[in-house]
Image (cartoon, rainbow, N blue to C red):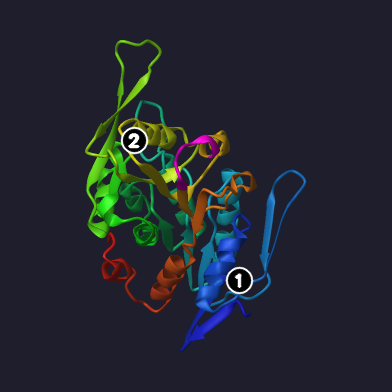
Amino acid sequence: MSGIKTTGEKKMMFFSGRAHPELAEEVAHQLGIGVVPTKAFDFANGEIYVRYQESARGADCFLIQSHTAPINKWIMEQLIMIDALKRASARSITVIVPFYGYARQDKKHRGREPISARLVADLLGAAGADRIVSVDLHTDQIVGFFDGPVDHLFALPILADYVGAKVDKDKLTVVSPDAGRVRVADRWCDRLGAPLAIVHKRRDKDVANQVTVHEVVGNVEGRVCVLVDDMIDTGGTICAAADALFAHGAEDVIVTATHGVLSGPAADRLKNSKVSEFVFTNTLPTPNELELDKITVLSIAPTIANAVREIFEDGSVTSLFEEQGGPA
């Protein structure tokens, strides 16, 4: 399939880095277009070389690269690919970052710390990106870090509809794993018509060495609880929150997150958890050791493809979520 799609006088081209080619192929298929053939390899010292096999002159170019591990390598490759498109006289460059690297470093908590999420946005802009598309950023303020349009997509409709179709809604309770995710959990409640509970973490002053106590605010006894978060990294926080729900009488716990980072001890923690199902999207590739029966991966490709289509046709990305009743 050709990597070029024309509409009137406009020309769309779709490019992918090497971080997550499976997702790129899915998005391209949804768009009815191929991924532009690209020659990319690493030199012996780790430097990256990129060259496109087709001319990008005058084209509206869409470049997808998710910031998975090794994250610094794939960010650098994306910057090089943007620069190559800029020097190839692309008409516009839209950078699709399903998982935005360094998103958790979005503010200074203490002196002499960087704001790395802002730095990544600056690097993308300096390389030549005109627009950024991302999915479920860790905080909304990251949208303001880039001096240009940012389309913030949401996986909530996909995840919530999956859970809603599986579970009796009369038994369902939506749970925020901490106070910071309450706003997102509240959107889930609106979509599913379910009550809200919160897992609150505090320090136990009577026990040394910073022991954390989990308190549950809300009724979870006899309920099927769906814990909602934007990402799961090592799995420690979410599994501890699930244990707290079971300790307070929850009948079952389902965990959902847009981004399955799943690093370090995540495999063992998920495998040994009492949680019946972990539901992610494929913004990131799932490690082979985590191909467990209790892990479900839903495709984010249709959401990304719809956004690309709206951008290319000068439509409204926001309308995609307003029509679905999701966040806008």
Please state which of residues 308 and 87 is positioned toward the viewer in this rendering: 308
For the record, the magenta segment spans 271-277
Could you tell me which secondary element the residue under label 2 belongs to? helix
Residue 53: x and y in percent read 68, 72
Q: Earlier in the sequence, mark 2 or mark 1?
A: 1
Asked if 268 appears above or below 260 in the picture, the reply is above
Residue 208: x and y in percent read 37, 10
Please state which of residues 266 and 248 is positioned toward the viewer in this rendering: 248
Q: Residue furthest right?
A: 44
Please state which amino acid type lies under the numbered disc 1.
Val
Question: Which residue is label 1 attached to?
Answer: 35
- Residue plotted at (74% across, 43% down): 45
Please indicate whether residue 287 sits to the left or right of residue 93 in the image.
right
Question: Which residue is label 2 attached to?
Answer: 245
- Magenta span includes 141: no
Residue at mark 2 to residue at mark 1: CA–CA distance: 45 Å
Asked if 12 appears above or below 250 in the picture, the reply is below
Residue 150: x and y in percent read 37, 60
Residue 12: x and y in percent read 51, 77
Asked if 71 appears above or below 15 in the picture, the reply is above
Please state which of residues 308 and 265 is positioned toward the viewer in this rendering: 265
| Other residues around mark 1 within 10 Å, as few (<14) / some (14–19) / many (≥20) | many
Residue 87 appears in the figure: no
Please indicate whether residue 235 sits to the left or right of residue 25 in the image.
left
Please indicate whether residue 241 sits to the left or right of residue 126 in the image.
left
Which quadrant of the figure has residue 244?
A: top left
Please indicate whether residue 229 sits to the left or right of residue 82 in the image.
left
